Amino acid sequence: MDEILHAGPTADVNGTQVPFKRPLSNIKYSPLIFLAMVLTYLLYQLSRHPAHQDELHRELLSIASPFHLDLDQKPSLHELPPARDLQRLPFLNAIIQEGLRLRNTPPGMDPRVTPKHRLSDVGPYKNLPPGIRVGAYVHLIHRSSEYFDDPLVWDPYRWLTKDCQDQSTGRKRRVLLAFSGGSRTCIGQHLAVECK
């Protein structure tokens, strides 16, 4: 495999021929680019909303073993709070969900084909014949006033509920398609969610 990835043009670096990697080798980095884009957006939004920043800070300090950065000490993984503690923080998760809603993948259609041997209803379109290619632009779904109040406003509170029976929040979670859905769900979704 290395021969395939490294075959091709080379560059002279300090008298040594160093091969350029082909684009195939960069596939493993694409989730990192997505993660960097969402995290950058989250930091940007937190910088614009000091009250949200303060609330998140209070929530992070509330866990049993909060992370404290000591610039005089070399950080270690043992100083980080357990992932299960972070996953239980409602405001942190709301911030992440709102970031995924507004800064997910680039706008593109998620294509599907209507089932064979029967008519289909897709959204407002009724009785579509078999074999018709249809698609949903996740970018537009996430910005639809049908699912979200003030859809262009960054508001992590929209993901918080006082009780788990809130139908509006459940509906929002069903249309949060940052990783697509169904049989076309991103295979890296669980890894990305674990990174949060």
Image (spheres, helix red, strand yellow):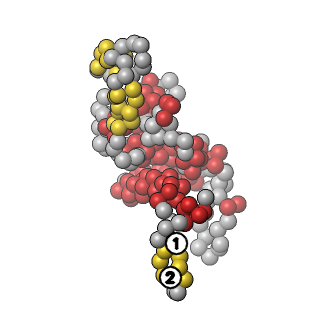
Say the numbered circle drawn on residue 77: none
Where residue 168 sits in the image (x, y, percent)?
41, 27
Circle 1 crowding by C-alpha within 10 Å: few under 14, some 14–19, many from 20: some
Instruction: Name the kind of residue labelled 1 in the image.
Output: Pro
Question: Mark 1–mark 2 contact, CB under 8 Å?
Answer: no
> Which of the image's four quarters has the N terminus?
bottom right
Give whichever of 53, 142 is nearer the camera: 142
Q: Is residue 139 above or below residue 82?
A: above
Where residue 25 sits in the image (x, y, percent)?
52, 59
Circle 2 crowding by C-alpha within 10 Å: few under 14, some 14–19, many from 20: few
Query: Dot 1: what SS?
Result: strand
- Name the residue: 34% across, 28% down: 134
Closer to the N terminus: mark 1 or mark 2?
2
The quadrant where residue 87 appears: top right
> What residue is disc 2 on?
13
On the picture, is 127 further left or further right than 73?
A: left
Give whichever of 106, 169 is nearer the camera: 106
- Name the residue: 35% across, 28% down: 133
> Which numbered disc, 1 or 2, marks the residue closer to the eye?
1
Give whichever of 193, 156 is nearer the camera: 193
Give whichever of 61, 137 is nearer the camera: 137
Where residue 105 sits in the image (x, y, percent)?
40, 46
The quadrant where residue 69 appears: bottom right
- Name the residue: 45% across, 46% down: 95
Q: Residue furthest bottom?
A: 15
Q: Is residue 49 above or below residue 15?
A: above
> What residue is disc 1 on?
19
Instruction: Name the kind of residue labelled 2 in the image.
Output: Val
Q: Is residue 159 visible?
A: no
Query: Dot 2: what SS?
Result: strand
